[in-house]
């Protein structure tokens, strides 16, 4: 199983003597009943206003033990993957920016092996209008639950050996902004077409189960036919490009609240997950004993059938039952050994390549690299083991875990740094941000180290950011024209 995507009680360089209880300085923690803590005196940040904290360590409703991932669904519902409690908790957040604490609605999942509703160290979830897909990391599967009542629906077991694709283009996992593939007019047009979808993220209706019944080819036959090719490709790969082996701070911080051993480099397993309105489920599969780098598997969200694979230095796709039919159009990317989070917006797939300290943007249909940003460091725009990304309007919100902050970037290349929220500043309180979501004027941050949530109010709601749509599209169109003239 891969390393946990959030912090442990013995996080490197982080004192937990008075933080693991959910209290910090003069801040009042929330009670088990869920009453929001009163805001403390705020140091002015023009972009956000700190509102409250919620939750504390424990196993009761409204308490958390390593909240590793957040997701917001229709109906103002917040889903919290409560990893070390082996469950997902659901809260109503309709009035959080007015100082009203999230209201507990339900939870689902119980500890155990991968049967029915049992979960073993889940790390992330993705939502449609009717279903919740959970990366059941310890059980090496995707578990699907009904959102209306939390009942178990189905699961997809994941084999540790993915189909081997043919290499096309490569984006190496060294961090930084450099791309091995040049910009093209098609790339700029992809950004332009995705901008509108990004700007409507808050209002877009999520897919229903009925909309995810499109047939895909027989991926199992393709997987079997290409298994040996994968093994040969992996053996030939340069293992030295995978990650920054000397950086172990977050490795310690990701052990999990239970104090378990770090399992980085051990068995593979699902981590980040995202679902598209068209019915594709994107699952990050971390590197381990059977693979040189992480991959992203694209599945049919209804059946679990494999459609294509991105990563591991190669990529493949199946179409109409034939892997060869679309393999040539699927580009290859080499990721580091940990992908913590995925996000879908329009035609784009945002990938948090944690061990490479960067965000990679792909065309979600072909897997071609569109852009990349981030490099290891603590300066503005630099990252130190990022854990999550949220798309809100024309902004990208990145949980920069080891730097204890949320950074905000423009969604269009070159993804200019806009502003940040530091968890160690006087007006905000979080230590190791494992996840961040934005919903209207609310920003909610999960703090895995302190096992609580921080609630902030955005000065510019994500819905208001859509007013820059025409400007964004014009910039993308100009970029496309510039590239086409070269």
Image (cartoon, rainbow, N blue to C red):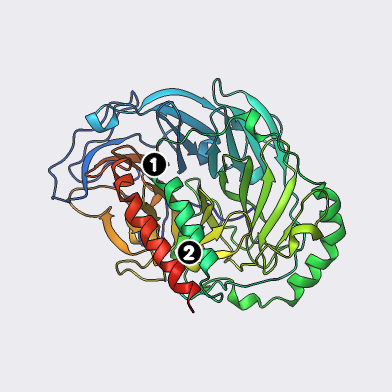
| Circle on res. 188 | 2
Q: Residue at x 70, y 34 (%)?
A: 213
Residue nearer the viewer, 82 or 291: 291
Residue 23 locus on image (x, y percent): 27, 41
Q: Position of residue 160 (x, y in %)?
A: 74, 54
Q: Which dot, 2 or 1, sits closer to the camera? A: 2
For the question of whether residue 16 can be seen, the reply is no
Q: Nearer the viewer, residue 214 or 350?
A: 214
| Number of marks drawn | 2
Q: In the rendered view, does 17 fall on the left or right side of 342?
A: left
Disc 1: CA contacts within 10 A as few (<14), some (14-19) or many (>=20): many
Find residue 287 and report its image quarter: bottom right
Query: What residue would you read off at disc 1?
Result: 451
Query: Is 416 drawn above or below residue 62 in the view shown?
Result: below
The residue depicted at 63 percent of the width and 29 percent of the height is: 209
Tell me the crowding category of disc 2: few under 14, some 14 to 19, or many 20 or more residues within 10 angstroms, Cα based: many
Residue 484, position in %: x, y?
50, 72
Circle 1 sits in a helix, a strand or a loop, which is it? loop
Q: Residue furthest top?
A: 149
Element carrying mark 2: helix
Compared to 405, does 66 lie above or below? above
Q: Residue at x 38, y 53 (%)?
A: 396
Query: Is residue 5 in view?
Result: yes
- Residue 227 placed where, x, y %? 83, 61
Of label 2 and label 1, which has the lower sequence position? 2
**Foreground residue among 72 and 247:** 72
363 left or right, relative to 202: right
Write down the quadrant of residue 367 in the picture: bottom right
Task: State how far apart marks 2 and 1 are (Cα).
Answer: 41 Å
């Amino acid at each position: 199983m891969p390393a946990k995507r959030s912090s442990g009680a013995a996080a490197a360089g982080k004192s937990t003597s008075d933080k693991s209880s959910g209290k910090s300085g003069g801040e009042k923690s929330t009670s088990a009943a869920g009453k929001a803590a009163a805001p403390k005196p705020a140091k002015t940040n023009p972009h956000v206003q700190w509102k409250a904290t919620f939750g504390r360590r424990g196993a009761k409703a409204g308490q958390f033990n390593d909240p590793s991932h957040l997701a917001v669904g229709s109906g103002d519902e917040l889903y919290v993957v409560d990893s070390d409690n082996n469950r997902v908790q659901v809260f109503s957040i309709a009035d959080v920016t007015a100082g009203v604490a999230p209201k507990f609605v339900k939870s689902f999942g119980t500890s155990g092996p991968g049967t029915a509703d049992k979960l073993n160290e889940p790390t992330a979830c993705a939502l449609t209008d009717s279903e919740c897909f959970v990366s059941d990391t310890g059980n090496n599967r995707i578990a699907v639950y009904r959102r209306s009542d939390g009942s178990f629906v189905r699961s997809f077991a994941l084999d540790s050996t993915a189909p081997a694709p043919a290499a096309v283009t490569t984006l190496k996992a060294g961090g930084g902004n450099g791309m091995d593939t040049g910009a093209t007019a098609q790339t700029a047009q992809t950004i332009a077409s995705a901008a509108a979808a990004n700007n409507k993220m808050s209002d877009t209706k999520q897919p229903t189960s009925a909309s995810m019944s499109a047939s895909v080819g027989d991926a199992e036959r393709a997987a079997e036919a290409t298994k040996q090719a994968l093994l040969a490709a992996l053996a030939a790969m340069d293992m030295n490009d995978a990650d920054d082996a000397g950086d172990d701070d977050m490795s310690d911080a990701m052990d999990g609240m239970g104090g378990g051993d770090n399992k980085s480099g051990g068995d593979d397993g699902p981590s980040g997950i995202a679902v598209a309105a068209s019915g594709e489920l994107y699952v990050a599969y971390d590197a381990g004993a059977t693979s040189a780098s992480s991959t992203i598997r694209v599945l049919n969200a209804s059946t679990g059938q494999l459609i294509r694979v991105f990563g591991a230095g190669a990529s493949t796709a199946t179409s109409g039952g034939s892997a060869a039919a679309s393999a040539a159009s699927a580009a290859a990317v080499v990721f580091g050994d940990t992908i913590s989070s995925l996000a879908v917006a329009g035609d784009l797939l945002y990938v948090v390549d944690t061990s490479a300290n960067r965000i990679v943007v792909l065309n979600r249909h072909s897997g071609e690299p569109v852009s990349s940003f981030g490099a290891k460091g603590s300066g503005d725009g630099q990252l130190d083991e990022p854990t999550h990304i949220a798309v809100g309007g024309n902004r990208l919100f990145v949980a920069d875990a080891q730097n204890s902050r949320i950074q905000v970037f423009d969604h269009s290349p070159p993804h200019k740094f806009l502003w940040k929220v530091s968890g160690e500043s006087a007006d905000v309180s979080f230590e190791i941000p494992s996840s961040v979501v934005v919903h209207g004027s609310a920003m909610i941050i999960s703090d895995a180290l302190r096992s609580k949530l921080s609630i902030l109010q955005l000065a510019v709601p994500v819905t208001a950011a859509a007013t820059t749509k025409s400007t964004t599209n014009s910039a993308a169109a100009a970029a496309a024209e510039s590239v086409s003239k070269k």
